[in-house]
Image (cartoon, rainbow, N blue to C red):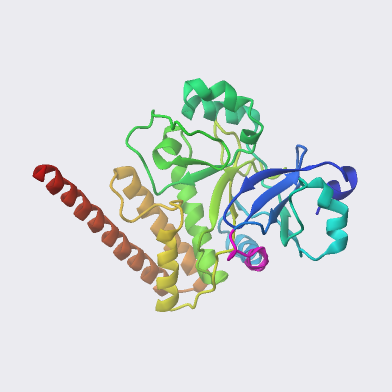
Amino acid sequence: MSPADTNTTPTAPFRQIGKGFCGSVWAPDRPGPASAMKREDGGPLRSVAKDSARHITIERSLKDAQVRLNLAQRLNIPQHRELIRGDDSEWWRLRSARFPPTYQPCNTLITERILPLDRSAREKLIDLFCPERSRETIKTSRKDEDCLIRPYLGRRRANFSCPSPFFTLRNKPLLVHQLDGMGLPIDEYAEVMADTLAILYWHARTDANDVEFVLAPPRSGEEEDSFQSDVIGAHRLWLLDFDCVNHISLDEVGIEQAARAFFRNDPFYPRPDWEHETDRRLWEGFSKRFVEASTAILGDVKLAQMMIARLEALGEERRQNRLDLQAADEMEKLAM
């Protein structure tokens, strides 16, 4: 952990800032830069040790591609700091009391914390998307201070103005029409995601399975070289969660594995089975940039073209399945 976490506030409690399938996520209960601790207290088949190993590999690949190839310039990955084992008695002796009493020592991954959006940005998001009856409650909710945006460029709903009745700012999903309606640079997000996937596939040689992207503030000193927004301020794309990432071979087998993971993941990326003109434009820009970034890494377009072709084939299957379901629904209605 950083010196500020261990020396300045040695007895300050840890507060839960998130929870997922792998486990719960904690941070010192204070503002500003800090460490985040992902505890292995979730699903029995998930491993923060695997998360740690993949994180190190991907962080190294990303830094190399950013420096040498000028790729994914506005993408950050939290700095990997330490993997703490559940049987590290000295570490836990000093810190167990900072967790709630029911939380026992377990394997824990320590990384840089991705800082949440500030109050001004949170209140603007609440005014835009939260049902009016819940706005004041959410604005004063401590849990909703932990605000990161999950940018879903691959999903949209027809009615932009209809707020969800189940509202939270923690890991807030925003669909592509919502992001576009806020004036956020969705085309630029798509290009950074394309760079990132090219790095994950061909440089780190992984399938990118179940990784997540969030929009969050930049580190100190990165503000000018970041995305800008009147609603959420200066921000960057951040990449996280690597415990489901697997190695791939650079051949048809690896491409199939990565392509299946692409559609299995949450809909961060533009989709080839688009149904809206904006989504068509996003997919074309994404796929073009993916081929360019892949060529910069590999020196050849073959694997990138194979990947795009496979994604488009799977996308066509998905489109046809939707059409078949719609036709079946119509037949059922006519038979009633």
Point out the stretch of residues depicted in magenta: 43-57
Q: Nearer the viewer, residue 118 or 11?
A: 11
Residue at 53% x, 27% y is 126
| Residue 87 place in picture, x, y as percent | 80, 66
For the N terminus, which image quadrant?
Answer: bottom right
| Residue 203 place in picture, x, y as percent | 56, 70
Could you tell whether 310 is left or right of 20 in the image? left
Q: Nearer the viewer, residue 117 or 187?
A: 117
Q: How many marks?
A: 0
Q: Quadrant of residue 64?
A: bottom right
Could you tell whether 294 is left or right of 107 in the image? left
Could you tell whether 89 is left or right of 79 in the image? right
| Residue 94 place in picture, x, y as percent | 88, 53
Residue at 38% x, 49% y is 282
Q: Is residue 243 magenta?
A: no
**In the rendered image, the vertical position of residue 92 relative to residue 185, given as above or below:** below
Residue at 58% x, 63% y is 69
| Residue 42 place in picture, x, y as percent | 61, 57
For the C terminus, which image quadrant?
Answer: top left
**In the rendered image, the vertical position of residue 103 relative to residue 223, given as above or below:** below
Q: Quadrant of residue 286?
A: bottom left
Most frequent secondary structure within the magenta stretch: helix
* Farthest left residue in view: 335
Q: Nearer the viewer, residue 60 or 140?
A: 140
